[in-house]
Image (cartoon, rainbow, N blue to C red):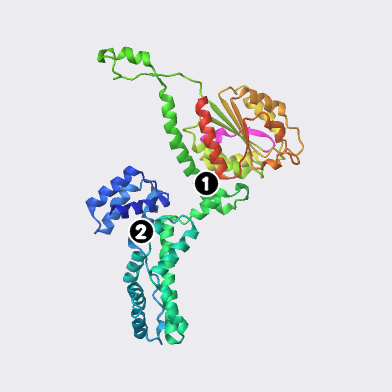
Amino acid sequence: MELTLGRFVHALRAADVEVSPAETLDAFAVAEHVGLRDRSLLQNALRLTLAKTAEEKAAFDLCFPRFFEGLAIAEPLKRSVLRTADTAAFLDEVRALEHPVLSEAVEAALAANHTGLSRLLRMNVDEDALDDMRQLRDKTAVINAAVNALGLPALDGFRAGGGSLATTAAHVQQYLKSQIKAHVDQQYRLRVDASGQRALLNAALAANLQQLPPAYYAEVERVVRKLAERLARRHRRRRKKDRRGQLDVRRMLRTNIAYDGSPVNLHWRKQKRERATVFLVCDISNSVSQIARFLLLLMYQLQDVLPSVRSFAFSNRLGEITRFFGELEPLPAIESAIVKLGRGTTDYGHAMHDLHELIGKDISRRSTLIFLGDARSNGFPARADLFRGMSRQAGQVWWLTPETEDRWTVGDCVLSDYRAWCRGVLTCNRLQDIEWFTERLLEGTRSLS
């Protein structure tokens, strides 16, 4: 039972249901208590134990019947094909091959015994091989192994002989292969792609966000939220440890004299620090707006683990958009900013002037400046002097550009004027790039906060 439940937990995780090891042990205990006879009771008990959010409950309800009911044979072998066939003679010939599994499979197919065929497939498809499936090409190997396990290649001999037996053998063989494929496809979806979206997500994670079709936006936004949740959990634990401070040995020894110096009561030395600030400046012109949208969304999903975040957007004139996020949900706030400030010919020099006017006096050594843009200023002055001044005031400055390094000095790109004053200039045009940078940012801002 534990092996079966362990595989079910694996399927739930593939469907984006987060199940911890402790929750898995709870599921084992629950299943042992309620038993496996009452399928509905088991489903409700495991649902209460393993699914926590409405989204996870929906995924659980999708996975449970797929996993525990096995293959649902959608269609029987077409009777019209066998109307003129001598199925009894064919079955006798198959039994003469002395391959019990093949004989049982052919008999179940001819008799439209869906339950028997489903059981036979579950018994002869390698569970370990199903668990090891990670990519689409892995399915082919599992299907071929199952075809051999059922002995289907032995039917090729009938097909070579011609006549009515050849026709019957061809149809039965094709039918059984289709049922094997359907079973493996179902198990692949359950174990690897339970939501039906894993291939899409993998493509989105690797794709250039500037070229992402609008149909992908909603799914990528969901991935960004999941990514933010994972990063937040990881860095919330680290930040809690940092906030605890250093062990105050003198005070600890002094207050534990009554216990012969045994460290019964621990004391921590804490240093109050000025709160760090992240200034996020995004070019939201057409060439960069898509990446800006996802970066802004991620930053505001990480509010509880990042220092104070102030956001600015520009195409021509620059403005602060922080208040939008206080008044609206993140996505409507981002769209409002794009509508208000995303017009006009891109002018980085003008944007630097506006930014210096707004935050020049607020930048300190505890500040992190992040610029997102392709630095294509349409021939306008770069105002690198203002950028240099802000960089000297700040603790660290990062520049994220959607273009690869070979494009940084081509045409009207002024990135070379800013590059020397940045801690790092990174190509950032995929979700993987945004994730990598956010990890570095969270680690860097911990030392500033």
Residue 342 on image: x %, y %: 65, 41
Residue drawn at 42 percent across, 52 percent down: 14
The x, y position of residue 308, in whole percent, is: 52, 29
Neighbour class for label 2 at 10 Å: few (<14), some, many (≥20)?
some
- Quadrant placement of the N terminus: bottom left
Report the side of 401 relative to 98 (left or right): right
Tell me which residue sits at (38%, 51%) in the image.
Answer: 10
Q: Is residue 319 magenta?
A: yes
Front of the two marks 1 and 2: 2
Q: Where, by quadrant of the figure, is residue 150 drawn? A: bottom left
Provide the residue designation for mark 2. 67
Q: Which residues are magenta?
A: 315-326
Between the C-alphas of marks 1 and 2, the distance is: 29 Å
Above/below status of 252 relative to 231: above
Query: Could one spot residue 335 in this view of the protein?
Result: no
Instruction: Specify whether residue 42 is painted magenta.
Output: no
Q: Along the line of sight, which residue is nearer the eye, 425 or 103?
A: 103
Q: Quick one: label 1 or label 2, which is nearer the N terminus?
A: 2
Q: Is residue 301 above or below residue 136?
A: above
